[in-house]
């Protein structure tokens, strides 16, 4: 996503509150600049299986394989590609099973898919919405010495010039499979094309690879006290306080950096002392943002939130504006699920402040 180099992610968080929350539904922003607040110390712990990232070449100039690797177990695939040619194409994710005896069984546990579309922000936002709904499990069987598409919808989808396709898929396999993300002619046979397709060179950003630890747990080191701590900020995905994940480009064996931590899912928990109320905000640090975010309160009120809700995107103009998330009783668990959407910018500042 070459636009992430120009700015930082902006995120507005509207409130979709149930009976357990204390604030009313609101989509307004407030003047609150995260750079002027002290950083709240956290522990960041990677966990989970492997992340396959396919975003280079982002604008694909020719037919071929954008990324491939052989993996098994607990996997997440995040792919993000634009048809950079002047003719219609297909963008396909193919699973190949080299075992001569046994089929491979693949369980897709969560997914989001956006595009093909010319509206890149809308594509990234739709991927996050679908992924967070968590009601989209399906099963695949890849025959022995055979192959099968991970996403049947893309088998017949036409990707016109300059259109984007973006997907985020969590799946588990019971034996090794090769994952191939390809762009190909519309009329070509998928399996036959894959047999002779060449790996395309990466673009200048080299944003592809296989990374260990597809998830991150972010926990505050101290207990937040709404009566004593004041307003504080927590930074995500800035490559300083929260480093970008490093991995290996399986197509050539070189090291690579996930500039933006795209495809990483964050679980954020800031413990707080009971007896008060705290308000939550997200502060954009410059650049457009459009996505969804998961929120769980008291381990029972769980829902996803469009970010923003009233317009497609937010964050390119007023860097001092923060979006109000909600006010909650301190001492009660508040968990946030965050993942950088395609076409949006990083980092973000999560702000917690005493409720007014």
Image (tube, grey):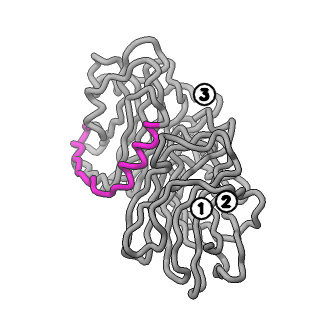
Give the crowd class for mark 3: few <14, some 14-19, many >=20 residues within 10 Å: some
Mark 2 or 1: in front is: 1
| Residue 182 painted magenta | no
Is 246 located above or below residue 36 in the figure? above
Give the crowd class for mark 1: few <14, some 14-19, many >=20 residues within 10 Å: many
Residue 203: image tag:
3
Residue 235: image tag:
2
Say which residue appears at 65% left-offset and 57% top-offset.
349
Say which residue appears at 57% left-offset and 88% top-offset.
275
Separation (CA) of disc 3 from disc 1: 36 Å
Q: Secondary structure at mark 1?
A: strand
| Left or right placement of residue 160 versus residue 286 in this view | left
Residue 4, x across and y down, in percent? 63, 38
Separation (CA) of disc 2 from disc 1: 12 Å
**Between residues 334 and 323, which one lies in front from this camera angle?**
323
Quarter that holds the N terminus: top right
Is 42 located above or below residue 347 in the figure? below
Is 158 located above or below residue 19 in the figure? above
Give the crowd class for mark 2: few <14, some 14-19, many >=20 residues within 10 Å: many
**Between residues 121 and 157, which one lies in front from this camera angle?**
121
Q: Does the residue at mark 3 contact the one at mark 2 (Cβ under 8 Å)?
A: no
In the picture as drawn, the residue positioned furthest to the top comes out as 86
**Between residues 35 and 137, which one lies in front from this camera angle?**
35
Q: Secondary structure at mark 2?
A: strand
Separation (CA) of disc 3 from disc 2: 29 Å
Instruction: Name which of mark 3 and mark 1 comes first in the sequence.
Output: 3
Residue range (magenta): 122-148
User: Can residue 336 be seen at all in this image of the molecule?
Assistant: yes
Residue 104, x across and y down, in percent? 26, 49
User: How many numbered circles does the render carry?
Assistant: 3
Disc 1 marks which residue?
281
Instruction: Name which of mark 3 and mark 2 comes first in the sequence.
Output: 3
């Amino acid at each position: 996503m070459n636009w992430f180099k120009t700015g930082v992610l902006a995120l507005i968080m509207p409130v979709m509150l149930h009976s357990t929350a204390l604030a009313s539904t609101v989509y307004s922003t407030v003047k609150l600049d995260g750079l002027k607040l002290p950083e709240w110390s956290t522990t960041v712990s990677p966990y989970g299986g492997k992340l396959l990232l396919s975003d280079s070449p982002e604008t694909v100039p020719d037919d071929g394989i954008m990324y491939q690797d052989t993996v098994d177990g607990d996997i997440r695939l995040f792919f993000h590609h634009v048809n950079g040619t002047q003719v219609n194409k297909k963008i396909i994710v193919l699973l190949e099973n080299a075992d001569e005896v046994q089929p491979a069984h693949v369980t897709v546990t969560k997914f989001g898919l956006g595009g093909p579309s010319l509206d890149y922000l809308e594509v990234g936002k739709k991927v996050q919405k679908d992924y967070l709904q968590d009601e989209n499990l399906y099963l695949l069987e890849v025959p022995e010495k055979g192959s099968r598409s991970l996403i049947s919808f893309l088998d017949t989808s036409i990707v016109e010039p300059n259109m984007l396709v973006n997907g985020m898929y969590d799946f588990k396999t019971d034996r090794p499979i090769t994952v191939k993300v390809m762009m190909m002619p519309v009329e070509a046979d998928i399996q036959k094309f894959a047999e002779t397709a060449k790996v395309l060179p990466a673009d200048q950003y080299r944003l592809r690879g296989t990374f260990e630890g597809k998830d991150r747990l972010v926990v505050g080191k101290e207990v937040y006290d709404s009566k004593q701590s004041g307003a504080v900020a927590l930074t995500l995905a800035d490559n300083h306080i929260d480093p970008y994940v490093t991995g290996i480009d399986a197509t050539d064996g070189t090291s690579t950096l996930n500039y933006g931590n795209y495809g990483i899912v964050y679980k954020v928990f800031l413990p707080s002392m009971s007896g008060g109320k705290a308000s939550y905000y997200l502060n954009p640090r410059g650049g457009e943002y459009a996505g969804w975010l998961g929120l769980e309160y008291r381990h029972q009120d769980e829902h996803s939130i469009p970010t923003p809700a009233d317009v497609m995107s937010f964050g390119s103009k007023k860097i001092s504006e923060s979006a109000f998330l909600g006010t909650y009783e301190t001492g009660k668990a508040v968990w946030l699920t965050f993942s950088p959407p395609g076409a949006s910018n990083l980092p973000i500042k999560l702000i917690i402040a005493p409720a007014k």
